[in-house]
Amino acid sequence: MDSILQPWPWYVSGPLITLVMVFLLYFGKTFGMSSNLRTLCSIGGAAKYSDFFKFDWKAQRWNLTVVLGAIIGGFIAVTFLSNGSAIDLNPETVKDLKELGFENAGASLLPGEIYDWNNALSLKGLAILIVAGFLVGFGTRYAGGCTSGHAITGLSNLQLPSLIAVIGFFVGGLIMTHFLIPLIFTT
Amino acid sequence: MKYLKFLLVGIFFGIVLVKSEAVSWYRIFEMFKFQSFHMYGIIGSAVVLGAISVWAIKKFRVKSIEDQEIVLPPKNKSYTRYILGGSIFGLGWALAGACPGPMYILLGTGVFSMLIVIAAATLGTFAYGLLRDKLPH
């Protein structure tokens, strides 16, 4: 039981993610979480504005069910399967974050400096969450997939487009982490 | 019943991503700083094992639960959309510290401000739908 409550090492987690992909393939589907955002648009009536949203979203109910499960899984993991241990970050990372004004790095999954309500609802905080979410939603559809669709499924299927997309993920991520986050957060 | 298996896979996915800390903003930051092997190990081992699995599925013509051939639809051939779209996604991924899967999972862990990110991501997808014909692909 103790090993379940501890954070799981990468060599346990990675293969289990493969298992998720294989299960979905065996069920006759593919693993890709970002397509749900398009489905949500269609449910909301976006087909009136763009043909991109004209598809039978009801055929995507299985994928929305995966999302529902993922939410429940998140709840189960923190409620019953965690011992509250801090994330074992590189001390360099913790130091770098402290210089950017992030205290207690690794004490929880997300920094309160971004996600706590009092910060999330400040003008700057709200702008950060909206811009970040918008870029994810726009970029993932433009690139035709996200981490699950390209980095896991696409690379496993040895698809060159997915490799290019993953390189793109890193170009954007490196620019944000090394140049923009210091500009946004330095206090 | 038909959907129960998808619910269970989703629950499993959510648990694995929390327990692996792949849903942590800090782990994504650390990855882009090249200060830890953790995320590279997760993604790398998932892909290596995934490639072997996909190869085996094709080689042995494994049938799905509904006795259909398992096919992975090929991605469209293009470079522009993948490098541009991918980079835009990467900017958001590093700032939010979450990609589409973890966004939902984190909501389940009780971080309700994630709803703002999910709403904005849906809006971003909607904006892509509106602009799609004007963007280079």
Image (cartoon, grey):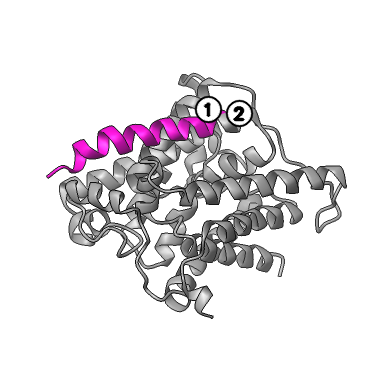
Picture coordinates of residue A98, whole percent (x, y): 20, 51
- Magenta-highlighted stretch: main secondary structure? helix
Reading the image, the residue beneath label 2 is: A161
Which residue is found at the position 48% from the left and 73% from the top?
A76
SS under mark 2: helix
Viewer-nearest residue: B11 or A46: B11
Viewer-nearest residue: A137 or B134: A137
User: Is residue A97 something one can see in this rendering?
Assistant: yes
Picture coordinates of residue A84, whole percent (x, y): 37, 73
Per the model, the C-alpha gap separating discs 1 and 2 is 7 Å
Residue A178 magenta: yes
Q: From the viewer's perspective, is residue A156 above or below residue A75?
A: above
Disc marking residue B82: 1
State left or right for residue A182 relative to residue B52: left
State left or right for residue A22 relative to residue B101: right
Q: Quadrant of the C terminus of chain A?
A: top left
Which residue is found at the position 51% from the left and 20% from the top?
B80
Name which quarter of the figure residue A127 lies in.
top left
Q: Amino acid at mark 2?
A: Pro
Q: Residues within 10 Å of mark 1 (few under 14, many from 20)?
A: many
Which residue is found at the position 22% from the left and 55% from the top?
A113
- Chain letter of the residue beneath label 1 in the structure image: B
SS under mark 1: helix
Q: Quadrant of the N terminus of chain A?
A: bottom right
Q: What span is in magenta?
A: A164-187
Q: Are marks 1 and 2 in contact (CB under 8 Å)?
A: yes
Q: Amino acid at mark 1?
A: Tyr
Which residue is found at the position 47% from the left and 30% from the top?
A168
